[in-house]
Image: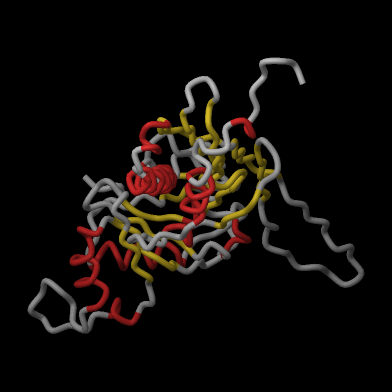
Amino acid sequence: MASGVQVRNDFPDIFASLLPAIDTIYLQDFDEPKVDWEQLFTMKKSTRQFENNTGFTGFPTVGTVGEGEDYPLYSVAQLYDKKFTHTKFGGAWAVTEEMEDDDQYELVASMARKFKRSFRFTREVNFSNVFNNANSATELSADGSNVLATHTLFNASTKSNLAATDFGVASAQTMFDHFASLTDDQGIRIGLRPWAIVANPAMRWVIGEVMRSSLKPYTTDNEKNILNEMDLKEIYWPEITDTDAWYVVVKPSTMDGNGLRAYNRQPFTTSTDFQISNTTMLSVGRGRWSRGVIDWRAMYGSPGA
């Protein structure tokens, strides 16, 4: 080795115990309040720079066939492609040798925890924007339209999944009717079932009154509330920014997972080492993922006022 070149073994005491300790902290599963938002997406792994998903129409209705006649040959048409390009997120923080020498381990350990928490929160906010931007051009479904919009099907008919009113008894009934009457692009009814309603925690009270009251709320007629019999999971997500927005989604496994989709290209990965030039510990964290909506039929709702 060339003279004058210093290597790690020349500095055995600098951050000797701190480096592995920081890595251990990163691996810990901290007991922090969480919103179970990942269950809303079909989560897949990826080993490539991007992933492409191609959609196809279903088959049209079949016709009658006379005795001895050939069966008509049906075909499906390609619809739209949805490209998921993974985005890299990352950051770093540093600790001086003096801080380690002055026995500031607890402070450094706290910084490591906060750094991982920041990364986790960044990921959560990024995923929540699939809902927050669902009726804007920044979040498109595979057909090129806003996720919540009026969509034109392959058979030239149109269907809207954008609710016009705040959440209430009437809008909830309309939502259930919407999913029950959905068709594919050839007009074949698929009858999707709503699975979960997603909203800011401020909507907890309204949704609870509408969905769980035995009698219809906001009326004195003592009518039975049929919505009380519907099985609709409630997910309250603080990162849904509009406090009167509401979104209803189908179960991720429905539609062959071609509704809300996410790809994990690289999980939260850290590298912690020290810099010889200034004996400073540097900790880097990064990750790569993509998320979005393939088929707009997976979602219905209102972005709020």
Residue at the spot 71% in from the left edge and 46% down from the top edge: 77
Residue at the spot 40% in from the left edge and 38% down from the top edge: 100
The image position of residue 108, as x and y in percent, is 37, 43
The image position of residue 103, as x and y in percent, is 35, 43
The image position of residue 26, as x and y in percent, is 48, 50
Q: Looking at the image, is 25 positioned above or below residue 270?
A: below
The image position of residue 83, as x and y in percent, is 61, 38
Report the colour scheme. secondary structure
Which is nearer the eye, 93 or 67? Answer: 93
The quarter of the picture where residue 253 lies is bottom right
Which is nearer the eye, 68 or 222? Answer: 222
Q: Looking at the image, is 232 positioned above or below residue 174?
A: below
Q: Looking at the image, is 204 positioned above or below residue 148?
A: below
Residue at the spot 49% in from the left edge and 50% down from the top edge: 21
Q: The N terminus appears in which quarter of the rendering? A: top right
Residue 240 as seen in the image, left or right of residue 49: left
Residue 125 seen in render: no
Residue 27 as seen in the image, left or right of residue 37: right
Residue 107 as seen in the image, left or right of residue 130: left
**What is the tally of numbered marks visible in this picture?**
0
Which is nearer the eye, 102 or 223? Answer: 102
Q: The C terminus appears in which quarter of the rendering? A: top left
Q: Looking at the image, is 144 positioned above or below residue 2?
A: below
Residue 119 as seen in the image, left or right of residue 163: right
